[in-house]
Image (spheres, grey):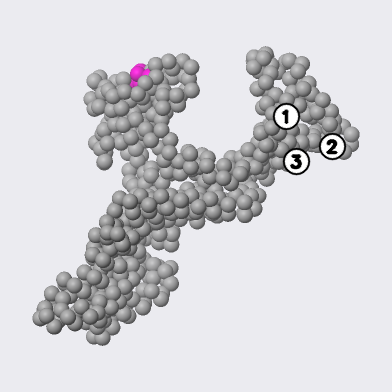
C-alpha cells in the first residue's frame, strides 16, 4: 500500500505542476495584460511616459515582467560613494540631466553605459522613453513627459512556476528581521508571560513560533507558512491564505494584560492576540515601552465568527452529512420498493430537483424559508448568526440528496440482478440478510469512493448558493478574481482546488481498498 500511495502522490504533484503551469500560461500569456487597467483610476489620471512607467510597475507587481529604472540605479551608485550628499555630486547630476535630453547624448555617459551593460548581460532589453516637450520649442515638459531609461525582462513561464513553487512554503529564521541594532538572535523554548511554554524567536518575523492557548485547537504555530500567493486588486497586498483563514466578524475584545504588565493591576479590554506579535522596525512609543519587553509590538486582532473557508466548510459539511443520512436510506428504500408508489414518488423528486435550474429552486426555498419559518435571507442581516446557516445548508443538501438517491437506487438494482443474489436465495438466506449483508454493502462501494471528494469539496464552497445568500465564503473567490483580473487569487485558487481534487482521489482509492475485497494494494495484481 505504501508504494502505491507514494506513486500516487508523485503523479499528483506532477499533475498539480502541469495544471498550475497551464493556468499561468493562460493568465500571463494568452490573456491581454492591458485588461488590468480597465478599472484603474491611477492609470487613467496619468499620461505620456508616466503612464508607461506606471504600466511597467504594475506589470512587475502582477508578475508579468521584471524591470529596473536607471533613476534608481543612478541614485544607488552615487549614494554608495558620496553618502547622503550624492544629489549634489556632478556625476549624479550629469547622468540625471542627460536622460532628460532628446537624442542619443545620454549614451556617452559612463553611468548609463554601466547600467546598459549590466542589465543586457542579464537578458534585459533596454527601453528608452524620450522626454516629451511642448511643440512650441520650449524646454517645458508636457504633463507626464519625463524621460526614462529602463531595463525590461519578460518573465519566462518556467521561472515563474519555479518562483511560485520554491516560495510555496517558508520557514521563519533568525535572519528575517532586518535591524542592525538587533544583535541577540535566537530560537528557544521558554515560558511566555502567561506561564505557558512556547517556542520563542528573536530575529524571526513572529516572536511566538509555537504556543499554547485556550482557543481551539489549543496549539498554534507561526513558524512555517504556506504561501498561496498575494492578492493584487481585491485584497491588495494580502497573502491569500490569510484572507481565506482569518475570521470575518467583529472584533472580539477580552480583558487582558500587556506582556510587560502581567502580574500588575493594569488590565485592558482589547482584541489583540499577543501570541501573534511581529517585529516593529520603527521607534517605540512611550506607551509601547511600558507594555512590551522588546520591539515585538505589532499584533493581529481576534474576531468573532468563522473565516471564509470556515463558513463554506460548515455549510458544505452539514449539507453533505444530511445528503448521506437521508439520501442513502431513501435510495435503498426505492430500490427495494421498485415500481411501487414509493419508488415513483422518489423518482418525481429526483427529476424535479435535477431539472429545475439551480437559481430557481434556491429562490423558491429562500421564499418558503423566510415567509413560512421566518429564517434570515441574507447572511449579514441575521440577528442570530446560527440561523443564517440554515437556508444555504438546505439549498445545498436537497439537490445532493436527489443525486445520492438516484445513484444508490441504481447500484442497488444492479446488485439485485446479480447472480450471487440468486445463489444466496437458493441457499436459504432471508431477504433482510441478503439486502443488509450483501446487496447494500456492495452497492455502497462506488458511493464510498466519492465521500472524500464531497467532504473536501466543502472547502471550495458553492458559488451560486453563497452569492444568493451573501455568505462570506470562498465560493465566489475565483469568479470575483477573474472579473477583477487578480492573477494572484486565480493561481492560488487553481492550486487549492486542484490539490483538494487530487487528495480526494487518493483518499477515495484508499477507502475503496478498505471496503472492496477485490481491490488490494498489497497483492501482486492490486492497483
In the structure shown, which secondary structural element does the residue marked by tag 1 occupy? helix
| Count of labels in the image | 3
389 or 267, which lies in front?
Answer: 389
Quadrant holding the C terminus = bottom left
* Viewer-side label of 1, 2: 1
**Residue with the most extreme right position:** 137
Q: Nearer the viewer, residue 505 or 467?
A: 505
User: Spatial distance from mark 3 to mark 1, Cα to Cα?
Assistant: 27 Å
Name the residue that disc number 2 marks: 134
Q: Earlier in the sequence, mark 3 or mark 2?
A: 3
Q: Mark 3 vs mark 2: give the one in front.
A: 3
Residue identifier under label 3: 48
Q: Is residue 58 visible?
A: no
Judge from the rendering whether residue 85 lies leftward or rightward of residue 518; answer left or right. Answer: right
x, y percentage for residue 168? 45, 41
Foreground pick, 402 / 166: 166
- Which residue is found at the position 28% from the left and 78% from the top? 414
Residue indicated by mark 1? 117
> Where does residue 97 sit, x and y in percent of width and height?
79, 25
The answer to whether residue 187 is magenta is no
Residue drawn where x is 23% and y is 25% of the image: 195
Amino acid at each position: 500500500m505504501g508504494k502505491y500511495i507514494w506513486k500516487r502522490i508523485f503523479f499528483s504533484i506532477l499533475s498539480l505542476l502541469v495544471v498550475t503551469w497551464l493556468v499561468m500560461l493562460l493568465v500571463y500569456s494568452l490573456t491581454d495584460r492591458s485588461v488590468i487597467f480597465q478599472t484603474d483610476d491611477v492609470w487613467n489620471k496619468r499620461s505620456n511616459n508616466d503612464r508607461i512607467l506606471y504600466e511597467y510597475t504594475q506589470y512587475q507587481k502582477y508578475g508579468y515582467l521584471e524591470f529596473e529604472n536607471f533613476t534608481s540605479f543612478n541614485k544607488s551608485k552615487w549614494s554608495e560613494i558620496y553618502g547622503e550628499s550624492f544629489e549634489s555630486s556632478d556625476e549624479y547630476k550629469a547622468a540625471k540631466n542627460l536622460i532628460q535630453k532628446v537624442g542619443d547624448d545620454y549614451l556617452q555617459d559612463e553611468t548609463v553605459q554601466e547600467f546598459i551593460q549590466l542589465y543586457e548581460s542579464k537578458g534585459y532589453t533596454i527601453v528608452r522613453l524620450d522626454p516629451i516637450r511642448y511643440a512650441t520649442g520650449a524646454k517645458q515638459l508636457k504633463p507626464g513627459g519625463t524621460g526614462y531609461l529602463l531595463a525590461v525582462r519578460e518573465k519566462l513561464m518556467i521561472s515563474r512556476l519555479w518562483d511560485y513553487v520554491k516560495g510555496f512554503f517558508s520557514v521563519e529564521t533568525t535572519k528575517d528581521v532586518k535591524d542592525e541594532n538587533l544583535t541577540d538572535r535566537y530560537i528557544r523554548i521558554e515560558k511566555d508571560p502567561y506561564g505557558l511554554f512556547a517556542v520563542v524567536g528573536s530575529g524571526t518575523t513572529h516572536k511566538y513560533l509555537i504556543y499554547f492557548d485556550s482557543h481551539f485547537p489549543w496549539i498554534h504555530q507561526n513558524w512555517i507558512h504556506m504561501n498561496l500567493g498575494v492578492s493584487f486588486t481585491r485584497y491588495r497586498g494580502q497573502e491569500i491564505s490569510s484572507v481565506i483563514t482569518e475570521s470575518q466578524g467583529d472584533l472580539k475584545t477580552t480583558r487582558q494584560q500587556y506582556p510587560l504588565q502581567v502580574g500588575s493591576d493594569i488590565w485592558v479590554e482589547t482584541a489583540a492576540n499577543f501570541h501573534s506579535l511581529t517585529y516593529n522596525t520603527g521607534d517605540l512609543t512611550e506607551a509601547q515601552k511600558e507594555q512590551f519587553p522588546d520591539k515585538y509590538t505589532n499584533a493581529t486582532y481576534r474576531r468573532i465568527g468563522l473565516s471564509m473557508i470556515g463558513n463554506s466548510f460548515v455549510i458544505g459539511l452539514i449539507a453533505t452529512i444530511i445528503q448521506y443520512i437521508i439520501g442513502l436510506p431513501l435510495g435503498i428504500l426505492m430500490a427495494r420498493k421498485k415500481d411501487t408508489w414509493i419508488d415513483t414518488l422518489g423518482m418525481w423528486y429526483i427529476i424535479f430537483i435535477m431539472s429545475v435550474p439551480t437559481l430557481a429552486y434556491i429562490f423558491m426555498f429562500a421564499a418558503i424559508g423566510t415567509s413560512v419559518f421566518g429564517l434570515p435571507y441574507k447572511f449579514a442581516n441575521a440577528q442570530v448568526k446560527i440561523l443564517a446557516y440554515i437556508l444555504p445548508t438546505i439549498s445545498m443538501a436537497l439537490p445532493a440528496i436527489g443525486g445520492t438517491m438516484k445513484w444508490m437506487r441504481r447500484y442497488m438494482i444492479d446488485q439485485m440482478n446479480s447472480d450471487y443474489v440468486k445463489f444466496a436465495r437458493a441457499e436459504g438466506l432471508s431477504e433482510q440478510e441478503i439486502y443488509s449483508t450483501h446487496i447494500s454493502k456492495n452497492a455502497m462501494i462506488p458511493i464510498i469512493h466519492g465521500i472524500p471528494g464531497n467532504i473536501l469539496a466543502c472547502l471550495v464552497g458553492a458559488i451560486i448558493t453563497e452569492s444568493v445568500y451573501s455568505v462570506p465564503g470562498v465560493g465566489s473567490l475565483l469568479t470575483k478574481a477573474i472579473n477583477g483580473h487578480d492573477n494572484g487569487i486565480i493561481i492560488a485558487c487553481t492550486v487549492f482546488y486542484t490539490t483538494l481534487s487530487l487528495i480526494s482521489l487518493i483518499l477515495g482509492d484508499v477507502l475503496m481498498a478498505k471496503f472492496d475485497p477485490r481491490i488490494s494494494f498489497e497483492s501482486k495484481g492490486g492497483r
